[in-house]
Amino acid sequence: MLRVFLMLAAFFGFTGVALGAFAAHGLKSRLSEQYLAVFHTGVTYQLVHTLALLGVALLATQLQSRLVTWAGVCFAVGIVLFSGSLYLLTMSGIAKLGMITPIGGVAFLAGWLCLGLAAWRLS
C-alpha cells in the first residue's frame, strides 16, 4: 500500500496546489465570493488530508495494521467526495451536489477514527 498511498498523496498534493492557484487567479473574477470561499474550503481540506495520507503511507511501513490501511482509503475517498463535490458545485452551480459533501466528511472522520484506533491498539 505504500506505493499506492504515496502516489495518491503526490496526485492530490499536485492537484490541490494547482486548483488553489487556478481559483486564486482564474476563478477570482468568475465566481462569487461565496463560491470562491467554498472552492477554497475544498482545496484546504484536500491539502490537509493529502498530508494525512502521506503520514499514513509512512506509518504503514512501520505498522502492519488494517486500520492504518483503512485510514488511508478513507482519506482518499474523503478527498474525492468532499473536495470533489465542492469543486463541481462551484463550477456547475448545481446545488444538489452539496449533498455528496457530507459523505466525504464522514469518510474523513472515519479515517481519523481508524488512525486513532490503530494508535490505541499499540502496545
Image (cartoon, rainbow, N blue to C red):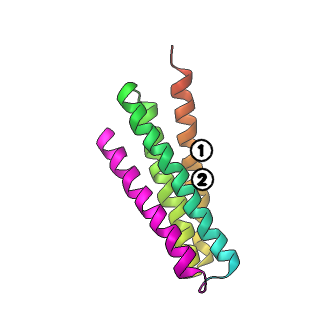
Horizontal side, residue 12 vs residue 20: left or right: left
Q: Residue furthest right?
A: 34
The magenta-colored residue range is 1-30
The residues bearing labels 2 and 1 have C-alpha atoms spaced at a distance of 6 Å
Residue 114 x/y as whole percent: 53, 34
Horizontal side, residue 34 vs residue 27: left or right: right
Measured along the vertical axis of the image, is residue 21 above or below residue 13? below
Given residues 15 and 104, the one toward you in this image is 15
Say which quadrant the N terminus sits in. top left
Residue 75 x/y as whole percent: 49, 47
Given residues 20 and 82, the one toward you in this image is 20
Q: Which element is circle 1 on?
A: helix
Measured along the vertical axis of the image, is residue 67 above or below residue 9? above
Instruction: Report which residue position mark 2 lands on.
Output: 105
Q: Label 1 sits on what residue type?
A: Leu
Q: Residues within 10 Å of mark 1 (few under 14, many from 20)?
A: some
Given residues 28 and 108, the one toward you in this image is 28
Instruction: Report which residue position mark 1 lands on.
Output: 109
The chief SS type of the magenta part is: helix
Residue 6 x/y as whole percent: 35, 45
Residue 2 in view: yes
Q: Which element is circle 2 on?
A: helix
- Dots 2, 1 in contact, CB < 8 A: yes
User: Which disc, if any, is residue 68?
Assistant: none
Residue at horizontal 43%, vertical 45%?
73
Residue 62 x/y as whole percent: 38, 25
Q: Label 2 sits on what residue type?
A: Gly
Q: Residues within 10 Å of mark 2 (few under 14, many from 20)?
A: many
Residue at horizontal 58%, vertical 76%?
90
Measured along the vertical axis of the image, is residue 66 above or below residue 32? above
Residue at horizontal 54%, vertical 62%?
83
